[in-house]
Amino acid sequence: QKSFDLINEDHTASNCCLASLYSDDDPIKIKKIHSKFAKHYNVKYQNTGFNSLGKREDGITRLGFVSSDFRIHSVAFFFFSIMLHKPKNVELYLYSNSDIADRFRDVIHDRSDQFTSIYNKATLDAVSTIRRDQCDVLFDLGGHTAENRLDVFASRCAPLQISWIGYAATTGIKNMDY
C-alpha cells in the first residue's frame, strides 16, 4: 500500500493492481486498489477531444483490439477463434503493443483487416492512430498485464470500450465501459 502512494509511472501502478489479484482475496479491497489506480490514470490521460461516431453508412461494424499478445500466447489463441468466425459485415482492426514477432503473429496479421503497431508510440500518437480508424468498439486484451495500453482507453478512442479476456478484474479506468 505504501508503494502504491509513491507511484508516478503507469507500469508500476499496473503491477500493484495485478499483484493485488494474488495477494488479497477480498474483492472489495481489490476494487479499491484498482479504483485508486484509476484516479492516477484518469487525471493523467483525460478524454482529449473524442467525438462520438455516427452510424456507419456502409453497414460495417469495425472492432478494434489492443494487445501485446498477438503472438504465441494464450490470449492470441483464444482471440484467433474470433477471427475464424467473423461475419462479413465486421472488420477487425488490431493494434499491437509488442515487438515480438513469431509465426502466429504473422497468421493473425494476415487474417486481420488492418494490423498496426503502436509499440513505443507516445500516448497521443497511439490515440490519434486508433481514433483515425474510427472503431465502433475497442477491446482491451491486456488489463494491467505487461505492455498494456490502458492510457489509450483512458483517453477514449471509441464510443464503446471493453476490457476482455486478458485480465481477471476491473481496470478501474473511467472510460472503460465494460
Image (cartoon, helix red, strand yellow):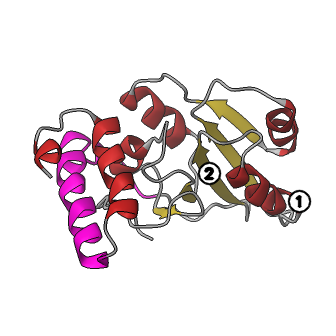
Left or right: residue 147 versus residue 23 is right
Q: Is residue 38 magenta?
A: yes
Q: Is residue 96 above or below residue 28?
A: above
In this rendering, would 132 be left or right of 19? right
Q: Is residue 80 left or right of residue 139?
A: right
Q: Residue 129: x and y, percent?
A: 52, 33
| 4 vs 108, nearest the viewer | 4
Q: Secondary structure at mark 1?
A: helix
Instruction: Answer yes or no: is residue 171 visible.
Output: no
Residue at x 42% of width, y 58% of height: 52
Is 95 on the left or on the right of 150, as rendered? Answer: right
Residue 50 located within the stretch drawn in magenta: yes
Q: Residue at x 32, y 59 (%)?
A: 20
Q: Position of residue 24 (x, y in %)?
A: 31, 68
The residue that label 1 is drawn on is 84
- Rounded to the nearest angstrom, the CA distance separating label 2 from label 1 is 16 Å
Residue 89 visible here = yes
Above or below — where is 23 with respect to 46? below
Whole-percent x, y for residue 156 in the image:
38, 51
Mark 2 or mark 1: whose residue is earlier in sequence: 2
Q: Residue at x 25, y 32 (%)?
A: 9
The type of residue carrying mark 1 is Leu
Front-most of 167 and 156? Answer: 167
Q: Amino acid at mark 2?
A: Gly
Q: Main secondary structure of the magenta part?
A: helix
33 is higher (above) or lower (below) than 130: below
Q: In x, y percent, where is residue 130?
A: 53, 40
Q: Which residue is mark 2?
A: 64
Magenta segment: 26-52
Alpha-carbon neighbours of circle 2 within 10 Å: few (<14), some, or many (≥20)?
A: many
Are there few (<14), some (14-19), or many (20+) residues within 10 Å of tag 1?
Answer: few
